[in-house]
Image (cartoon, helix red, strand yellow):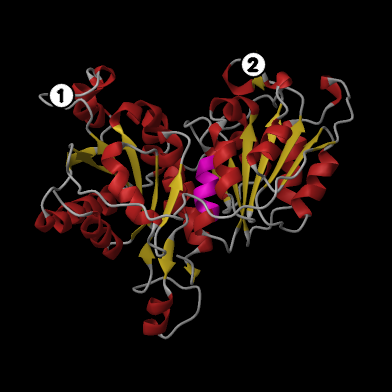
Amino acid sequence: MIEARDFVGAARERGFEWYAGVPCSYLTPFINYVLQDPSLRYVSMANEGDAVALIAGVTLAGAARTAGERKQSGSEGNVGGASARPRRGIAMMQNSGLGNAVSPLTSLTWTFRLPQLLVVTWRGQPGVADELQHALMGPITPAMLDSMEIRWELFPTETDAIGPALDRATAHMNETGLPYALLMKKDSVAAYPLKPGASVIGEKWPHSAAVLKARGVSPAARPSRQDALRHVVAHTPTASTVVLASTGFCGRELYAIDDRPNHLYMVGSMGCVVPLALGLALARPDLRVVALDGDGAALMRMGAFATVGAYGPPNLRHLLLDNGAHDSTGGQATVSAHVSFAQVAAACGYASSLESDDVGQIAAWLEEPALDGPRFARLLTRTGTPGNLARPSVTPVDVKTRLMQHFGPATGVR
């Protein structure tokens, strides 16, 4: 058995300063320790897939330069090099929730080569008595990791084994760009108390009321997704704004309008663009981050609204383009017509929430100054997409690399 501080300290020495996850009793010592260390960041997620996506966003934020490293290098400029190091994050989860993370682990972190360390608890380990719900997942957990091409080893239970395990993990991550997993048995980490007053989140701003400005025009008279994306391109400066487009036609249409180095076109991992954007926005407060969401994707992972409402920073804007259909997978209707997403966002704690069918209002929304927290807007659009729509000719890895090189490391940002 090891102490939480020994593992967390060794991980911090190797650049792991961000943690996200869903609690498990095995993980309690880690969570309690990280919550009480001001140099670390823990984000409590609605589900395990969102945790993976958020840490992927932290990785996407690029290299970090600490104040001490800048002083040592004698430079305050936004330049990489020996004094810059990759941001590293850890996604933590119980193995019973590993299935919730399969989508981003197979089509986000794998496809874009966004490495992270996974700490997965091994409930239902063969030969160890546990609850009935773990009876199947326990034996198949190692095979699931193998099937997803995630290299793994058992979580270290001796202090002297921590450093070598983390070195193997970071070496694999650096070489392949893929996640590495530590599978944690019961009683691997000694208890660590949570002191009174420690909290998962800090103080938040008062909830705002949703602003509903839809004119009520017929669905056919609504703006197209292309109309909306043209406005996004026109109002998101390349030098200071990252635009993350949800999977499907949204990313493909954005690419067709203007392929820019500040764009990322998500493929797969449906519903994960918002936690991805949240991780990036938290890690890079010097950048404005715009997440382009879809109604089907938003419905799939609505827990992300609550997470953004709790943790979302002022530099994050969440734009939902809602055409009421799974447009890129056959055109079947979603149930979005029955949902007021703006009111959901307002209830979850976004600093402002707008619902409109006027693309001009979205242009103005993109130009509005930052508030004390994240902004949300839902634009009602019509269905349909241009014929012969091209797919991006740049690979996901090239898109990621181009974006990270375009912005470089942020001076003084952890």
Residue 99 left/right relative to 1: right
Q: Amino acid at mark 2?
A: Gly
Corner quadrant of residue 155: top left
- Residue depicted at 25% across the width and 17% down the height: 132
Q: Residue 351, how many percent across, how many down?
A: 70, 49
- Residue depicted at 57% across the width and 30% down the height: 302
Q: Amino acid at mark 1?
A: Ala
Which numbered marker is on residue 129? 1
Badge 2 local density, few (<14 within 10 Å), some, or many (20+)? few
How much space separates mark 1 and mark 2, taking CA atoms?
47 Å
Which numbered marker is on residue 410? none
Q: Was residue 280 drawn as part of the magenta stretch in this picture?
A: yes
| Residue in front for this viewpoint, 318 or 111 | 318
Q: Residue 291, how many percent across, how many down?
A: 61, 43
Q: Residue 85, how many percent across, how many down?
A: 36, 65
- SS for dot 1: loop
Residue interval drawn in magenta: 274-281
Q: Is residue 348 above or below residue 173?
A: above
Name the residue that disc number 2 marks.
331
Residue 69 left/right relative to 157: right
Q: Is residue 286 above or below residue 330?
A: below
| Residue in front for this viewpoint, 103 or 250 | 103
Corner quadrant of residue 386: top right
Callouts 1 and 2 close, C-beta under 8 Å: no
- Residue depicted at 38% across the width and 32% down the height: 101
